[in-house]
Amino acid sequence: MTTPSPTTALNRVTNFLGYFSLGLGGLEAAAPGALARTLGMEGREGLLRLYGAREIGVGTALLTQTGTGKWLWARVAGDVLDIATLLPALGATNPKRANAGVALASVVAVTGVDLWAALQWAKHEAKARKPLPAGT
């Protein structure tokens, strides 16, 4: 039995998310201090660097590994962590809260794309596991 291939659009979105992860992860890993200052999150540089490593790992996996669905779910889980990390930066005492708000809105938007892609891959993988009717 051959596995049906996902749509071209889904492959393109998945590749985009892989490259997006590499870019974002590279920024977080290479310049956590600048990012922390921009968001008013000084003291969180180590966490941002760790998140960068996570992004690089997931991006690399999306672009090179099989089991794409699980890596998309890893992006969704990472988005939840990112949202939880950004929420406190919206506090009234943060002079950079507007920047943090833009970052949060961006994460929420990409979470929607990640979730859509993960659900589409789940459908694709479910179809691939469904046995063909007898005689086909």
Image (cartoon, rainbow, N blue to C red):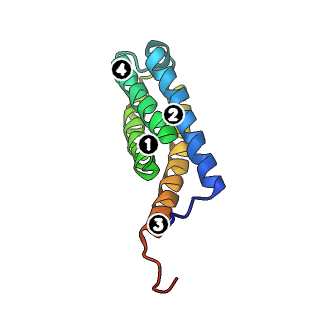
Mark 3 and mark 4: Cα distance apart in space: 43 Å
121 vs 89, nearest the viewer = 121
**Tag 4 near tag 1, CB within 8 Å:** no
Q: Amino acid at mark 1?
A: Arg
84 vs 79, nearest the viewer = 79
Among the two numbered marks 3 and 4 on one chain, the one whose residue lies closer to the N terminus = 4
Q: Can residue 96 be seen?
A: no
**Tag 1 near tag 2, CB within 8 Å:** yes
In what element is the residue under mark 1? Answer: helix
Mark 2 and mark 4: Cα distance apart in space: 20 Å
- Taking the spot 40% from the left edge, 39% from the top edge, the residue there is 78
Q: Which residue is mark 2?
A: 21
Mark 3 and mark 2: Cα distance apart in space: 27 Å
Q: Which residue is mark 3?
A: 128
* Image location of residue 93, percent across then percent down: 41, 23
Q: Which residue is mark 1?
A: 75
Mark 1 and mark 2: Cα distance apart in space: 9 Å
Among the two numbered marks 1 and 3 on one chain, the one whose residue lies closer to the N terminus = 1
* Image location of residue 98, percent across then percent down: 54, 28
Q: Which residue is mark 4?
A: 44
Estimate how packed mark 2 is, as few (under 14), some (14 to 19) or many (20 or more) residues with alpha carbons within 10 Å: many
